[in-house]
Image (cartoon, helix red, strand yellow):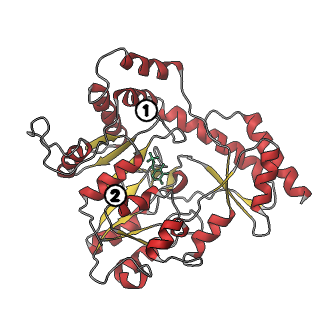
Amino acid sequence: MSSPDLTEADRQAVMEVINTPILSMGQHILDFEQTFCDRIGRKHALGVNSGTAGLHLCVRAAGIGPGDLVITTPFSFVASSNVLLFENAVPVFVDIDPRTGNIDPKLVAEAAKSIKKFLPRKGATDQSTLKAILPVDVFGQPADMDAINAVAVKHGLTVIEDSCEALGAEYKGRPAGTLGDYGVFAFYPNKQITTGEGGMIVTDDKEAATYMRTLRNQGRTVGDVWLQHTHLGYNYRLDEMSAALGVAQMGRLDELLLKRQQVADWYEALLTKIPGLETPIIEPDTTRMSWFVYVVRLDQNIDRNTLVKQLKDKGVPVRPYFLPIHLQPYMIERFGYRESDFPVTEDLGRRGLALPFSGVMRQDQVDYVCQSIREILSAA
Ligand SMILES: *Cc1c(COP(=O)(O)O)cnc(C)c1O
């Protein structure tokens, strides 16, 4: 499905760290954090050991606690909602824009105005307060953040931008991750850059950054002596090997993004000629797309399961994308969600198919995928 893009120099960067005694909390994490401040122009960056950990720390820093409400999207990777459940907060889902798959800012505005109408069937109380909005830059395309921020300002809400799929993307010329109060990136091997496992939080809020640094390191604040812990914290530290790989990868970010763009362009050129599917829509506000995955939408009358099986027989791995969060078993159990609660999300969830995608794909591989799809669909 995907493959990391690593050079000999990237591997060498990791090897150099292994040959030193400092494998955690050394200079490389600081260097990695600095690459983010420099690249996207935020005052503070904090390396953590996953994107999920990063989102969780933002939830803590935003003061989101038991029973608090956060408006977010059901069309995402589960982590963006799970971090709310970690604190016993309640994700209040609103449906998405059918073009981009990003949270619909008109619904965000409606929900912020009369949140009661948007509460899940169970799991939230009348005493709950709305604290934040958590939009996701889905598939590498920024959410409509100006509209979302306008709602946040009007209602005094914190905005946590989940940019885990959108490193390098730009919205009206501004980098993804800088568009809310907090931004979070992730570096699992299928992301635009990888550190194996890893994540990065960016913010301009100095106090929050200091607090999150503390939580990342088992709750030790500045001045705490060894084994003294002021807060309940976590081990969310990023090790030095990962950080060194991150620095090397960040040095190649534009090259990595261009290669992914090229693969997306090859797909687009071939797939637009095939009836029965739609290629991704990029909004004019997305002044730079950062391709994370390449997801096509099948026409209603195409049986996705059959297509998946037939492509697998031809050696082409594809995957349905996303399975809506509100229909995950634990979400149904906890909040009483049902089928048809979020029709646009469910429709895209039923018709979306992620094709093999990475920056190291060759043109002949893309040709083969498209040729296989064409053959199967025209035979059907
Ligand atoms: C990848 C991803 C995350 C978290 O990533 P991990 O590093 O695997 O914890 C969070 N949100 C979204 C939307 C993602 O795609």
Q: Amino acid at mark 1?
A: Met
Q: Is residue 359 above or below residue 132?
A: above
Are there few (<14), some (14-19), or many (20+) residues within 10 Å of tag 1? some
* Image coords of residue 341 (percent x, y): 54, 78
Task: Locate residue 243: give its quadrant.
Answer: top left
Rendered-image quadrant of the N terminus: top right
Which quadrant holds residue 369? top right
Q: Sequence order check: which comes first, mark 2 or mark 1?
A: 2
Mark 1 element type: helix
Question: Which residue of the protein is positioned furthest toward the right in this rendering?
Answer: 379
In the image, is residue 109 above or below residue 248? Answer: below
Q: Residue at x 36, y 14 (%)?
A: 19
Furthest toward the top, the residue is 19
Instruction: Give the Cα separation between the discs numbered 2 and 1.
Output: 22 Å
Residue 178 shows in the view: no
The residue that mark 2 highlights is 180
Q: Is 379 displayed left or right of 132 in the figure? A: right
Horizontal arrangement in the rendering, residue 99 relative to residue 78 (left or right): right
Where does the C terminus fall, quadrant-wise? Answer: bottom right
Tags 2 and 1 touching, CB below 8 Å: no
Return the residue at label 1.
250
Q: Residue at x 79, y 69 (%)?
A: 301
Amino acid marked by disc 2: Gly
CB of residue at label 1: within 8 Å of ligand 1? no
Q: Position of residue 348 (x, y in %)?
A: 63, 66
At which x and y percent is residue 299?
Answer: 75, 66
Give whichever of 203, 128 is nearer the camera: 128
**Left or right of residue 129: residue 349:** right
Is residue 288 something that shows in the picture?
A: yes
* Figure check: 151 above or below 8: below
